[in-house]
Amino acid sequence: MYNIDFEVTGNGEFPMDMLRYDGCHPTDTASAHAMHTPRVGTPDYLAVRTVRLRITSPEKTQRPTRDRWASFMWAVGSVRAEKL
């Protein structure tokens, strides 16, 4: 088994369905809080946020779907795989 850790960065509405789509979850409390979308029209809505996520997989080559994240205007940063 492997932990595949990665970050996504964006603003506005966080694409919650991507958690299911990529089979990932936040790695820490700060990231879980950053997933919550601020109210539209507030300065926080436009603030750029970074969320740390993890996929646990039997495959070392498993990766987040960059193009799908990008379709929601969130960018995938560095990706790192670590054997459990």
Image: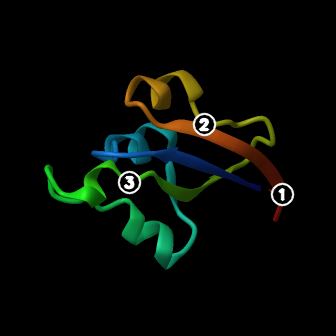
Q: Label 1 amino acid?
A: Glu
Could you tell me which residue is drawn at 57 percent across and 56 percent down?
Answer: 53
In the drawing, what numbered circle is on residue 82? 1
Q: What is the quadrant of residue 73 in the picture?
A: top left
Q: Earlier in the sequence, mark 1 or mark 2?
A: 2
Relative vertical location of residue 76 with respect to residue 47 in this rendering, above or below: above
Residue 38 x/y as whole percent: 23, 59
Percent position of residue 47, x then y: 38, 54
Query: Could you give the CA–CA distance between mark 3 and mark 2, rounded to whole angstroms?
Result: 23 Å
Q: Residues within 10 Å of mark 2 (few under 14, many from 20)?
A: many
Mark 3 Cα-neighbour bin, 10 Å: few <14, some 14–19, many ≥20: few
- Which element type, helix, strand or loop, lies under badge 1? strand
SS at badge 3: loop
Q: Which residue is mark 3?
A: 47
Q: What colour scheme was applied to this rendering of the protein?
A: rainbow
| Secondary structure beneath label 2 | loop
Q: Which of the numbered marks, if any, corresponds to residue 64?
A: 2
Q: Are marks 1 and 2 in contact (CB under 8 Å)?
A: no
* Relative to 6, 16 lies left or right: left
C-alpha separation, residue under disc 1 versus residue under disc 2? 15 Å
